[in-house]
Image: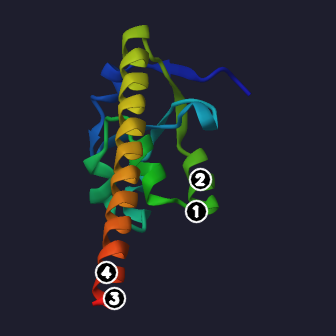
Amino acid sequence: MSELKEYTAEEVSKHTSEKSCWMVIGNDSNGGPKVYDVTKYLDDHPGGAEVMLDVAGQNADEFFEDIGHSKEAREELKKHLIGTYKIDAATLAKMKEEAEKKKAQQGSSSMLMIVLVALIAAYIAYTKMQ
């Protein structure tokens, strides 16, 4: 297999239309960010072309992962691989910082949910004792 071309954020950001739709998907846990040209797949995407065009020209990894795509979708994605995503040190640092902030927010959200559930349980127990 030949070496994949490396694309910058600037190059990817130019492909945001139905005529040329690229996106970045991938992270450290699955081999790193890769660039995909999904132009030919727009009409076949089960969610419609619009969802893909909304994240065209961007790093769409979080969006892709949050949807919970199937194994078949991941296999389909491989057909559209055109290269790797070149990340400079500043962008990498920013991505790590954003990931850490998100993780911290999720942690505080979880704690808030636990406290809220405990308060509701205490209220229900109190009202039943009345």
Residue, far top = 89
Q: Marks 3 and 2, how far apart in space?
A: 54 Å
| Kind of residue at disc 3 | Met
Residue located 60% across and 45% down the image: 78
Compared across the picture, whether 76 is left or right of 87 comes to right
Q: Secondary structure at mark 4?
A: helix
Q: Residues within 10 Å of mark 3 (few under 14, many from 20)?
A: few
Which is more N-terminal, label 2 or label 3?
Answer: 2
Q: Secondary structure at mark 2?
A: helix
Dots 3 and 4: beta carbons under 8 Å? Answer: yes
Compared across the picture, whether 20 is left or right of 84 comes to left
| Viewport quadrant of the C terminus | bottom left
| Kind of residue at disc 1 | Ser
Q: Secondary structure at mark 3?
A: helix
Which is more N-terminal, label 4 or label 1?
Answer: 1
Dots 2 and 1: beta carbons under 8 Å? Answer: yes
Q: Residues within 10 Å of mark 4 (few under 14, many from 20)?
A: few
Q: Nearer the viewer, residue 114 or 91?
A: 114
Q: Marks 3 and 4, how far apart in space?
A: 5 Å
The disc label shown at residue 126, or none: 4
Rendering coords of residue 24 (x, y %) = 43, 35
| Kind of residue at disc 4 | Tyr
Residue, far front = 130
Q: Is residue 30 above or below residue 120?
A: above
The disc label shown at residue 70, or none: 1
Residue located 43% across and 54% down the image: 66
Residue located 39% across and 36% down the image: 104
Q: Is residue 110 above or below residue 8?
A: below
Q: Residues within 10 Å of mark 2 (few under 14, many from 20)?
A: few
Q: Marks 3 and 1, how far apart in space?
A: 49 Å
Residue 127, image quadrant: bottom left
Q: Is residue 130 above or below residue 108?
A: below
